[in-house]
Image (tube, rainbow, N blue to C red):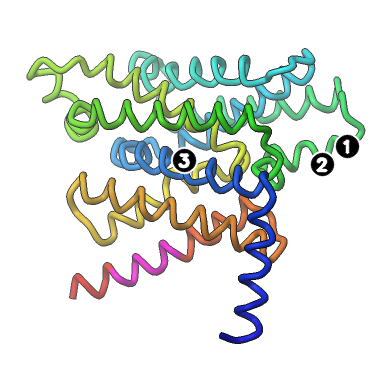
Amino acid sequence: MTAVDQSVIATLLNAWQYPFVRYALAVGILIALCSSLLGVTLVLKRFSFIGDGLSHVAFGAIAIASVLNLSNDMLFVLPATVCCAILLLVGGERAKIKGDAAIAMISVGSLAIGYLLMNMFSTSANISGDVCSTLFGSTAILTLSKSEVWLCTVLSMLVVVIFVLFYHKIFAVTFDENFARAVGTRAGAYNLLIAVVIAVIIVLAMNLVGSLLISALVIFPAISAMRVFKTFRAVTICSAAFSVVCAVSGILIAILADTPVGSTIVAVDMAGFALFALLGRLLAR
């Protein structure tokens, strides 16, 4: 074992002694797992960009909660994000402005309103620091309290349980919604369920990678798995494993290299996608 290896191991063992590092790893694994499960469904339904739109909605909700001096902004941010998710995924079917146009309008509007409110009614002397942390998740994952960790754990496990219980229904609605309706599946109800679960994931993921980088947690694992596997179940399992490994690797690298956690995780996701794309080409030959 080289001196460099010993130094890395010593640094990681020293970091493991701190509770916030253990909290970050636990929450990072759970959030990455949840994001990857629904990511496959969003990619196949051509709603990949919804994560970015809802994350901006959550940013605007956080700004409003900050202006109102709410002690627990989750009580406001989560319902607001859920309502917008329902409007986009369910109400969008009957709206005049649909799909990517509606997402773009809500995304840009929420981001602008949030930043405007934070500047007009600032409750902190470091506005740029607060905005940067919210948008890029630079330190949020390393400053979680024990209550926030428990909340993330409960919500994450709830998302996993819902996905497992309704796996076949989600599968049917994802691939052929009209056929699912024809055989008696309540497609509207399951679209509503998907919208609510996605909103929960988005709010949780803001602590890990920030508002602007959430789409990476949703998209990269799914499209990486699709480069190698072809069935829905295989893609979902591979996507979950890929996302968890990248999240853990990104957090550990960020600790060792003293880099922003969110950006590091996304960089690892990109490297993983490049590797899977190459592997897919080799297998195709």
Q: Which residue is mark 1?
A: 126
Q: Quick one: label 1, few (<14), some, or many (20+) residues within 10 Å?
A: few
Residue nearer the viewer, 102 or 12: 12
Left or right placement of residue 136 versus residue 196 in this view: right
Q: Earlier in the sequence, mark 2 or mark 3?
A: 3
Is residue 105 visible in the rendered structure shown here?
no
Residue under the point 28% across and 48% down: 237
In the rendered view, tell whether residue 282 sits above or below residue 201.
below
Circle 2: residue type: Gly
Circle 3: residue type: Leu
In the rendered view, tell whether residue 21 sits above or below residue 85.
below
Image location of residue 255, percent across then percent down: 67, 59
Residue nearer the viewer, 73 or 120: 73
Q: Quadrant of the N terminus?
A: bottom right
SS at circle 3 = helix
Callouts 1 and 2 close, C-beta under 8 Å: yes
Q: Quadrant of the C terminus?
A: bottom left
Cα separation between marks 1 and 2: 5 Å
Q: Which residue is mark 2?
A: 129
